[in-house]
């Protein structure tokens, strides 16, 4: 199953998608049992709200890194290898993919 498409936005310690009557709560980065919202709750909500944009940007950056620096297109010393950053990006993208468990 794929994640809910973005854009997402922060609303206090909640993460929502859409506007008005079409609003959908994606996540709560706080405690349901209290109105106490900490700076950490707000920071977590901000990071979660950025997730779809971050995933799209990382996917695009990984493709550029791979195209310029990896495999037979990179420097001769890297032939058949992938840059560490490319491998890390692929792993992070895979972690966010629908197939990740």
Image (cartoon, grey):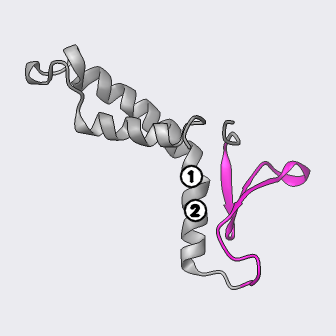
Query: Which residue occupies the foreground of this view, 45 or 33?
Result: 33
Residue 50: mark in rendering: 1
Residue sitting at x 66%, y 61%: 10
- Report, in whole angstroms, how far the alpha carbon at label 2 lies from the one at label 1: 6 Å
Q: Relative to 66, say whether 51 is above or below.
A: below
Q: Which residue is mark 2?
A: 46
Find residue 16 and report its image quarter. Answer: bottom right
Q: Position of residue 51 (x, y in %)?
A: 56, 49
Q: Is residue 74 left or right of residue 40?
A: left
Task: List the single residue furthest toward the top.
Answer: 72
Residue extending farthest to the right is 21
Q: Which numbered dot is residue 25?
A: none
Q: Magenta segment: does it hold 69?
A: no
- 27 up-or-down from 29: above or below: above
Crowdedness near tag 1: few (<14), some (14–19) or many (≥20) residues, C-alpha within 10 Å: some
Q: Is residue 64 left or right of residue 37?
A: left
Q: Is residue 76 left or right of residue 50?
A: left
Residue ID at (31%, 35%): 87
Give residue 12's position: percent from left, percent from top: 69, 70
Residue extending furthest left? 77
Quadrant of residue 42 within the rendered picture: bottom right
Are the residues flagged by discs 2 and 1 in contact, CB closer than 8 Å?
Answer: yes
Secondary structure, mark 1, is helix
Tell me what residue is drawn at x 55 percent, y 78 percent. Answer: 39
**Residue range corresponding to the magenta coloring:** 6-35
Q: Give the SS element for disc 2.
A: helix
Residue 36 figure quarter:
bottom right
Q: Position of residue 49 (x, y in %)?
A: 61, 55
Tell me, yes or no, whether the highlighted magenta stretch contains residue 22. yes
14 relative to 71 in the view: left or right: right
């Amino acid at each position: 199953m794929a994640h809910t498409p973005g854009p997402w936005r922060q609303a206090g310690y909640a993460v929502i998608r859409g506007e008005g009557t079409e609003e959908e709560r994606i996540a709560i980065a706080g405690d349901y049992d209290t109105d106490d919202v900490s700076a950490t709750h707000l920071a977590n909500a901000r990071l979660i709200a950025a997730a779809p944009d971050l995933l799209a940007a990382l996917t695009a950056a990984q493709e550029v890194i791979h195209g310029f620096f990896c495999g037979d297109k990179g420097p001769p010393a890297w032939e058949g290898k992938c840059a560490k950053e490319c491998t890390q990006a692929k792993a992070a993208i895979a972690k966010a993919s629908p197939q990740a468990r």
